[in-house]
């Protein structure tokens, strides 16, 4: 008897190359894969959705999370993704970093400026080569990330010894997702941010889509930090040993 596996995500994600690669690894003799699709998710009541025993569900733009949680409560499928964690944790970079640290996963050295809490007063000093936040020094180049994970307006500030300026990352427009501003050197003074060290990746970013005890899938792509252009150029299907994973 096959396991009915539902993929409850917007079509752009559910039918993407990485998702097809992941689902293609499942034995068709063991799994019946059901992709819900945008029309069903957005327009049909949850009572009309397919009954599944296992569910992959994750949010993106226009995703009705509250509706999907109603479906989960109604059908009680086994969840591959914890949608409540997605909603309550993954949307806040502060909480994501804490979860990673609690799990013993390395994160870049960082400082949080939390202006959402009026009771916290921050002392910030800015210099050509570094900033000091509440007495903690962070050298440039540094990355300024909004705490809202849905906000892709991430800035990178460069030291004056390297010419200064800042690079501004944003959601892809055409084939671009960053622009360099040679005369913009000052960090933002409104809103809450994570300031962290800039990690040099030699011009390549790796986005991990899934990791398990003996399998992982990731996409390597030219970093938009290089020239602003987004080019996905290789997919990696990496089989991880149990020893490496647990280490």
Image (tube, rainbow, N blue to C red):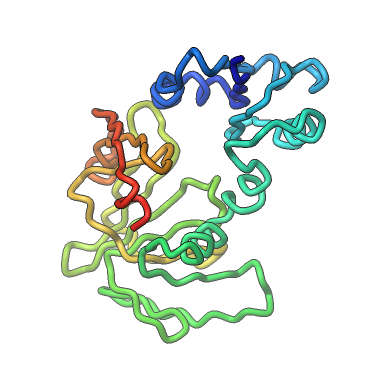
Left or right, residue 14 beside residue 247: right
Compare residues 44 and 5 and report the one nearer the observer.
Answer: 5
Count of numbered circles on the image: 0
Viewer-side residue, 237 vs 107: 237
Above or below 227: residue 56: above
Q: Which residue lies furthest to the bottom in this view?
A: 135
Q: Where is residue 102 in the image (x, y as percent from the top left)?
A: 51, 66
Q: Nearer the viewer, residue 86 or 131?
A: 86
Residue at 59% x, 24% y is: 7
Residue 190's place in the image compared with 223, above or below, is below
117 vs 76: above or below: below
Horizontal arrangement in the rendering, residue 110 relative to residue 228 (left or right): right
On the image, the x and y values in percent for residue 54 come to 63, 28
Quadrant where the C terminus sits is bottom left
| Residue 170, percent from left and from top | 42, 42
Q: Residue at x 29, y 73 (%)?
A: 139
Left or right: 23 as drawn, with respect to 1: left
Q: Residue at x 60, y 20 (%)?
A: 3
Q: Where is residue 122 in the image (x, y as percent from the top left)?
A: 54, 80
- Image quadrant for the N terminus? top right
């Amino acid at each position: 008897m096959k396991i009915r596996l539902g993929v409850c995500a917007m079509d752009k994600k559910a039918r993407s190359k990485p998702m097809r690669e992941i689902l293609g690894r499942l034995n068709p003799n063991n799994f019946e894969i059901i992709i819900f699709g945008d029309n069903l998710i957005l327009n049909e009541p949850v009572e009309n959705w397919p009954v599944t025993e296992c569910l992959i569900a994750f949010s993106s733009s226009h995703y009705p999370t509250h509706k999907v949680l109603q479906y989960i409560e109604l059908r009680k499928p086994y969840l591959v993704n914890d949608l409540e964690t997605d909603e309550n944790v993954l949307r806040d970079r502060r909480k994501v970093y804490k979860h990673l640290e609690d799990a013993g996963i390395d994160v870049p050295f960082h400082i949080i400026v939390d202006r959402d809490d009026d009771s916290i007063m921050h002392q910030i000093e800015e210099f050509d080569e570094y900033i000091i936040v509440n007495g903690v020094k962070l050298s440039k180049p540094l990355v300024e990330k909004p705490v809202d994970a849905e906000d892709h307006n991430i800035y990178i500030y460069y030291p004056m010894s390297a010419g200064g300026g800042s690079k501004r990352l944003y959601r892809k427009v055409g084939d671009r997702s960053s622009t360099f501003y040679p005369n913009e050197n000052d960090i933002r003074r409104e809103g809450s941010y994570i300031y962290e060290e800039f990690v040099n990746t030699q011009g390549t970013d790796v986005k991990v889509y899934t990791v398990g005890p003996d399998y992982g899938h990731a996409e390597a792509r030219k970093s938009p930090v290089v020239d602003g252009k987004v080019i996905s150029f290789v997919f990696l299907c990496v089989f991880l040993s149990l020893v490496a994973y647990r280490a």
